[in-house]
Image (cartoon, rainbow, N blue to C red):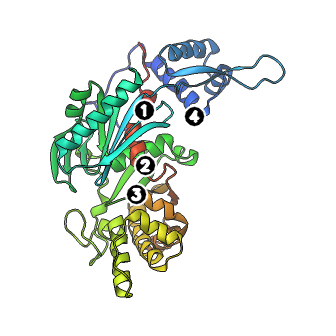
Amino acid sequence: MRRIDLKKASVARPNTIRDINRQIVLNYVRERGPISRAEIAQETALQRSTVSLIVDELKGGGLIEEVSGESRGGRPPILLSLRTADPVAIGVDLGTITTIVATSDLAGRVLEQEEFPTDHDARRTAARVVECAREFVRRGGGTIEGVGVSLPGLVDQETGTATFIPHFKWRDWDVAGELGGALGLAVHVDNDANAAALAELWFGRPEIREVRDFIIVLVEEGVGTGIVFDGQVYRGRSGAAGEFGHMTIGQGAPVTCAAGSRGCWEAFSSQRAALARYEQSRRGGGGAAERVDFKQLVDLALEGEEEARAALRETAHYLGVGIANLTQGLAPEAVIVGGPIVRAWPLIVGDIKAAVGEGICRGLPPAQIIASTLGEQPTLMGALSLVLTTKFTRVSLA
């Protein structure tokens, strides 16, 4: 039973039940649509007149629309669907190498995007983001309602401040204030792994949407984790939860982590670790020490090159070691692996699961090990989700 936090508790108002019912109806349309008013009334046990009143309000707010269903001999039924004609959100996926700015409709479908190298100067990066976002706002004709930003570091989600981005050594950057002031829009900011976890919770595959406790392991330049407990992202104090990339799992990793250690999970399991293993094997085998990026490494592995496959499989083994630790400590129902590495999933899933199996004590409940279905850039979907989920959790139109 959850204890009430009296510092944050809000008492029920006369419109509380109305708002809860609106949220329920809207989410039925989001997950089950196209769906009829009668089906919603039957599923929710709400009066049909109440459903119709809520539907009219949601239509007036531009959240849902009526569509014609398939005719079975008579007049086609009128069904309800999310309104997806216009962009409603801007997502900013600020990565260590590139930044992506994109728009999406209410269903999370990416409509437009622009990509550019991330500048090591935070102000120049922010200026480029503002430039792209302003152009998207102009094209949207006033339908965009907010901006979500995912960042590779510690973020105080409540204040929208990036407290520390290790790769760039950025500290105490008021992202929400700076971007919000320039764009005149609400700006929501979070750690990239937390944002990706939110996207999995709301827009991932159906079996994950039904899971209440899961962890996403985000494999990029570093390794980050997003934790979902009881259907909510767990951020901890000042957004610092989930920094499992810096737990110690050994010594002598092929690269250092962002903090300079060769014992961290990140140092064994990141994209940089896989690339270092590949380059070392090429030099040791007398091959050319030509540098490749991670996408090229995965391509080579999928084409059958043994050194590339070995580098990815060893990296997958250490991913599994870390996942075993998380599973023993937190007992999630599922662990989702996200990032560009999922393109090599058929090659690495066996090594991940084998390492997890070896690392878990007998008798502990196993967790599903699943590849993310949000593509190679779950953090972009995460950034968009920071805006989109506010539409489905706070729907008062009064």
Q: Position of residue 44 (x, y in %)?
A: 61, 25
Q: Find disc 1 in the rendering and name its residue.
A: 388
Give how far apart the Cα atoms at labels 3 and 4 are: 25 Å
The reply, left or right, for residue 284 in relation to residue 312 is left
Q: Secondary structure at mark 1?
A: helix
Circle 1 residues within 10 Å: few <14, some 14–19, many ≥20? many
At x 48%, y 71%, the residue is 300
| Label 1 vs 3, first from the N-terminus | 3
- Mark count: 4
The residue shown at (19%, 50%) is: 164
Q: Which mark is residue 217?
A: 3
- Mark 3, residues whose alpha carbon is within 10 Å: few (<14), some, or many (≥20)? many
Question: Which numbered tag is attached to residue 31?
Answer: 4
Query: What quarter of the picture does the C terminus occupy?
Result: top left
Using a 10 Å C-alpha cutoff, classify the residue at mark 2 as few (fewer than 14 neighbours), some (14 to 19) or many (20 or more). many
- From the image, tell me which residue sits under label 2: 378
Tell me the kind of residue under disc 3.
Answer: Val
Within 10 Å of disc 4 (Cα), the crowding (few <14, some 14-19, many 20+) is some
